[in-house]
Image: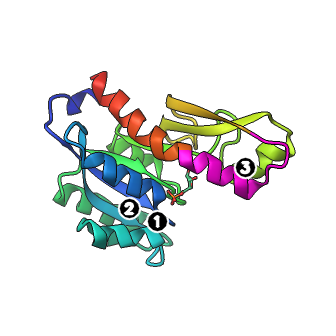
Amino acid sequence: MEKLAGLKKVKTAVFISGTGSNLKSLIKFSKNKKSPISINLIISNSKNAKGLKYAYQFKIKKKILDFNLNKIAEGKILSNLKKNKINFICLAGFMKVLSADFIAKFDGTIINIHPSLLPKYKGLNTHEKAIKNKDKFSGCTVHYVTKKLDSGKVILQKKVKIGNAETPISLAKKVLRQEHKLYPAAISKIFANL
Ligand code: GRF
């Protein structure tokens, strides 16, 4: 990450698979004068990802790649990232696991948002798990991406209270509202500390 110190606005790619509400919050954040990043590329593994609408709305380049051909797709991503001089990657609801090779190439400059208080509940269905275990709190985590899934160093976390009548859907909504604040805050924290 130190290699990004001093860059005016760090050129960033956001990887999505779905609704893209975190992408939207990151785009809004990037438009602030004080934001350390600009969003120059959106990568989606699905042409049906609703979040792709933000590429049109905010006139940001996009690339849709078929991840069934993992190695080939990653090669294509790499050349797109290079072409667009991308230095920083934010995964935002991206449902594919990147290879160790790919992660190594972007050593320490890929971050992710995860809807649980890591190290609790890595992987999928975090809200179901938190409710099933009768946890009093859940939340979200922004962390560095390493080759071990959802295990990289934590940058920031936010707790939310789980209510008595909470369902996975209501909890997901509650946590998502916090994600939209936490992701920009985590990025500010990273670059403030460089
Ligand atoms: C978020 O809860 C994120 O933490 C998880 O998937 C969801 C994506 O939401 N990995 P969105 O596409 O950003 O709206």
Among the 4 quarters of the image, the one containing residue 87: top left
Q: Please report the residue visible at 58 percent of the width from the left and 41 percent of the height from the top.
A: 150
- Name the magenta segment's main secondary structure: helix
Label annotation for residue 70: 1
Does the magenta portion include 170?
yes
Task: Give SS at disc 2.
Answer: helix
How does the figure colour the protein chain or chains? rainbow
Q: Quadrant of ligand 1?
A: bottom right
CA separation in Å, label 2 and label 3: 30 Å
Q: Which residue is mark 3?
A: 127
Q: Please report the residue visible at 75 percent of the width from the left and 54 percent of the height from the top.
A: 168
CA separation in Å, label 1 and label 2: 6 Å
The amino acid at mark 3 is His
Residue 116 visible? The answer is yes
Q: Please report the residue visible at 22 percent of the width from the left and 33 percent of the height from the top.
A: 4
Residue 54 position within the rendered picture, expressed as x and y whole percent measured from the top left: 35, 67
The amino acid at mark 1 is Asn
Does the magenta portion include 2?
no
Quick one: quadrant of the N terminus? top left
Q: What is the crowding at mark 2: few (fewer than 14 residues within 10 Å), some, or many (at least 20)?
A: some
Left-right relation of 171 to 65: right
| In this view, 93 is above or below 191 | below
Q: Which residue is mark 2?
A: 74
Left-right relation of 26 to 146: left
